[in-house]
Amino acid sequence: MEAYIADWLNLLIRWLHFIAGVAWIGSSFYFIWLDNHLEAPREAADDEKGVGGEVWSVHGGGFYHAQKYKVAPARLPDRLHWFKWEAYTTWLSGIFLTALIYWYGAEIYLIDPSVADLSVPAAVGIAIAFIIGGWVIYDLLCKSPLANDTRVFAGVLLVLTAALAWGLCELFGGRGAYLHFGAVLGTIMVANVFFVIIPGQKLMVAAAERGEAPDPGPGITAKQRSVHNTYFTLPVLFVMTSNHYAMAYGHEYNWLILVGIALAGALVRIYFVNRHSGEASLLPAAVAIMILAAIAIAIAPRAGETREGSVSFDQVRNVVNARCTSCHSAAPVHPAFPVAPLGIVYDTEEQITNDADRIYQQAVVTRVMPIGNLTAMTDEERQILDMWYQELRGAE
């Protein structure tokens, strides 16, 4: 029953996380687009009342006219819309999911003894320290003189991000490391909203309500952090789906793959931001494509080595029964899995043989299965699966 309740919590909170994330990212992308499409106001009266830019658009059968003030209007409207709860809900639901899956289930999804033999309290404590420390270091970096030069700041941030990926992958199993990489970036994004963007906006609103000219400084700082957030978005979205791709997180150089894909995501976002600004250079997108192509080529499966001898299916069946069917069965016996993960079942010879490619990729190439090596599959058993697979494919 405990596992069943956990599954329902997982489903509902993951759904909420997805919905809130769509709302947050959608509004973020829209306002970045809006800022980059503003034109000088056509009406002299608009310029006189402080309008700095405007844009006309059409959507859903209607025309829209959006204006942005240089600082603030002379009189605030009765109703002012804020965009913050999308960010807060995304983070809160994401941290709940992280705690439910990767901390409560640390022995399954976070700890990999072959990477680092950590206790559950140590692993969870380190994970939390990374999440908090990531924000502290980033915030200090933004407040340092390095932030005055965009290219230098980006270079330092790239180095620190690579160090983050390497450190996580040296401590945790690949799947957990990737997730916590995204958790660090996501925490930076929401902390930007909570500690910088919203407080800055509140200062501007308070000044306007007092009839004073707002200090534009907080608005400039908020814009800087908002731009940083948009470049983090695509790397975080990749991490949210990365648990489906053991070829990446299960690779020997998983940290380098993570850095490469994150960089490619940021470059794609840079391309679109530049395009919105009228700078139509394809260079960032082209570099992103080359990075992804290089990764795909580098981690492509290689032909297996020719091994002497052969194995019988009975040997394979024994390995699968001992190491896989406690979870991947029509009636799983592992308490963490009331039903077979992804519906994958290995109760019959036909089911095992039909899924040979997956078994080989997950248990031999990436070695991410059994997850967290819960059932202690040995190197000799992986070799049996390897030889079986090579013989199976060689016979085709």
Image (cartoon, rainbow, N blue to C red):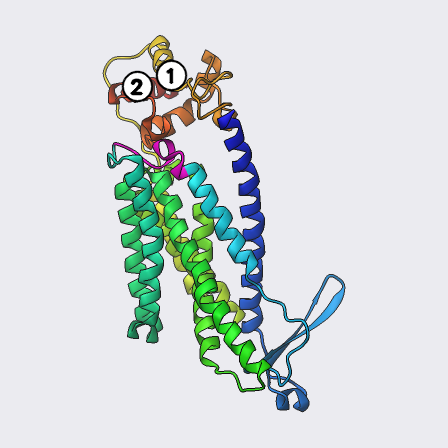
Q: Is residue 109 magenta?
A: yes
Numbered mark located on residue 205 in the image: none
Magenta stretch bounds = 102-113
Q: Position of residue 214 (x, y in %)?
A: 52, 83
Three-letter amino acid code of the residue under disc 2: Met
Badge 2 crowding class, 10 Å Cα cut-off, few under 14, some 14 to 19, many 20 or more, is many
Q: Position of residue 123 (x, y in %)?
A: 30, 40
Distance from the alpha carbon under mark 2 to that under mark 1? 14 Å
Indicate the quadrant where residue 174 lies: top left
Residue at figure coordinates x 63%, y 88% from the top left: 49
Indicate the quadrant where residue 98 lies: top left
Which residue, given by chain and number where applicable, does mark 2 sit on?
Answer: 387
Residue at figure coordinates x 30%, y 70% from the top left: 152
Please state, as top left, top right, bottom left or bottom right, where the C terminus lies in the image: top left
Q: Position of residue 247 (x, y in %)?
A: 37, 37
On the question of residue 172 being in view, the answer is no
As drawn, 152 above or below 170: below
Nearest to the observer: residue 47 or residue 62: 47
Q: Secondary structure at mark 1?
A: helix
Q: Is residue 261 magenta?
A: no
Which residue, given by chain and number where applicable, does mark 1 sit on?
Answer: 320
Q: Are marks 2 and 1 in contact (CB under 8 Å)?
A: no
